[in-house]
Image (cartoon, rainbow, N blue to C red):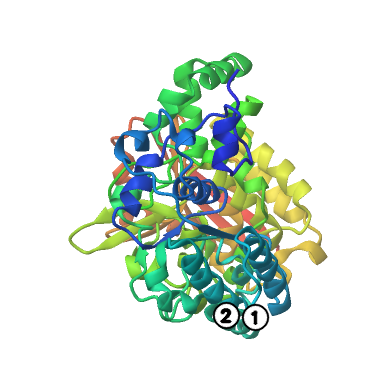
Amino acid sequence: MVNYPIGIQTFSEIRNNDFLYIDKTKYIYEITHPGKYVFLSRPRRFGKSLLTSTFDSYFRGYKDLFKGLAIEKLEKDWTEYPVLHFDLSDIKKGTVEDFEENVNSSLASMEEEFDIAKTSDSPGTRLKDLVERIYKKTGKQVVLLFDEYDAPLLTVLHNPERLETMRTELQSFYSPIKKLDPYLRFVFITGITKFSQLSIFSQLNNLNNISMLPQYAAICGITREELVDNFQEGIEALGEENDMTPEQVLAQLERTYDGYHFARKGPGVYNPFSLLSSMTNKDFNNYWFSTGTPTFLVNMMRKFHTDLTEIDGSTAMQEDFDAPTENMHNVLPLFYQSGYLTIKGYNPRSGMYTLGYPNEEVKVGLMRILIPFYVQSDPVPASNACWDISEALLDDDIDKALTAARSYFASIPYQENTLKDAPTTEGHFTAMLYVMFSFLNRYVYSQVRNAKGRLDILIKTDTTIYVMELKLDGDLDKALRQIDEKDYTIPYQSDGRKVVKVAINFSTEERTIKEWKIEK
């Protein structure tokens, strides 16, 4: 039996209790020779805490824990250093008092460990004094590890006043690090989002951000090679439980959990939490998405009046999405850094990146969260309608699917209809239909661009490609002509699947689909 370390983020516990460990220790050696100030951004539950814990064990000199791993052949000295390891993940109240209480509690434990007296009530001053005194007492440089450094900020990201207060508090805490340079061997800072160095690490101008470097693309997450090499028993068990061949299991795992790219080159990775959970429970549920409702995403989408239909497939320069989240002008930085978008392509001539949903788990999970905001406050009727639509699409019956969608939209009570407070625009109706179609189907795209325009909705099933043009109180024949005039079907004519043109007309008065026309 393979022991999968779900929720276990301590390296020593994994190694001492014979849990499966995917060897990432070569990165530990590469980063620390000769690295000193390092920053890494990755989505939640992607292995950041385990990586930080691995640094902890390495610098404490726990050589026995690394037997049989890559670093055993690389490291010759195994020098022991004093380590101060901060975990800020529980500081989520968004108040200075909560931050100071938690950090001071950690500092008190560290002072007790090294038998050093408290010198101040200020976390920043207390940290500075502790490092200096440890160095003086031991004669060794100190290692600083900060896990989930941005947790106190994410809670108040949508509140400018509280964000500024918390940002000032964190800046005060981290500011002594630069002055401590002679006493420090290594500093590692990790979190979900990227806040500007000027606002948080104002003095740390030599902080090396490795988040998008190709050589560290797979430092967190699990590559295809690592999956095949380490999960054979789990793959076989998944197949037996779900009546699937190993090849079918691998294909399903790829569709559901793979697809993350954190650099323009380098391997993609699977979501480690979802993959381990899938192996343990022998199914393909949406594990990562169910562990946290991204309410902050919805708040930011509202703040920036985000067009949902333009997120998947969006293009941007690196500085537009790998950007400080506290002064962003759209949701791309937050969506990318939080793991809801990932790199899908890169054009070296223009320097432009294409971003998209990583996989089925993320896209379907996000659509389920957005149902109350785009369609109906009660998600249960929407779920039932989506099942009807999905079944019809699987049967290649687009007429039946649109009939189900029309009946559902028409049945929404006025007080629960998102349109009662929203502008009745073609874009909003498109977003509603896009959410419904995407609820159970990863292969749904919106605002698909070509040289002549943008296609409203594209759906791909195993046998058919549906090219859809939507109108609001419009003309169906005109919509079909637009599909032809703008060559929307041409890219798919050599695909091998049937290409079906669909014109849909929404009614502002009836607040539902009024009519449609299908041309095969």
Residue 179 placement: quadrant: bottom left
Look at the image and tell me whether residue 461 can be seen: no
Earlier sequence position, callout 1 versus callout 2:
1
Q: Does the image show residue 299?
A: yes
Whether 421 is drawn above or below 217: the answer is below
Question: Any mark on residue 220, and which?
Answer: none
**Residue type marked 2:** Thr
Q: Which residue is mark 1?
A: 120
Asked if the residues shown at circle 1 and circle 2 are in contact, with their CB atoms under 8 angstroms apart, the answer is: yes
Q: Along the line of sight, which residue is nearer the eye, 216 or 181? A: 181
Left or right, 272 with reference to 405:
left
> Can you say whether 489 is above or below 85 in the image?
above
Please give the residue where the numbered disc 2 appears in the rendered image: 125
Circle 1 residues within 10 Å: few <14, some 14–19, many ≥20: few
Q: Position of residue 241 (x, y in %)?
A: 63, 17
Amino acid at the residue labelled 1: Ser
Query: Where does residue 145 sit, x and y in percent of width and height?
Result: 50, 59
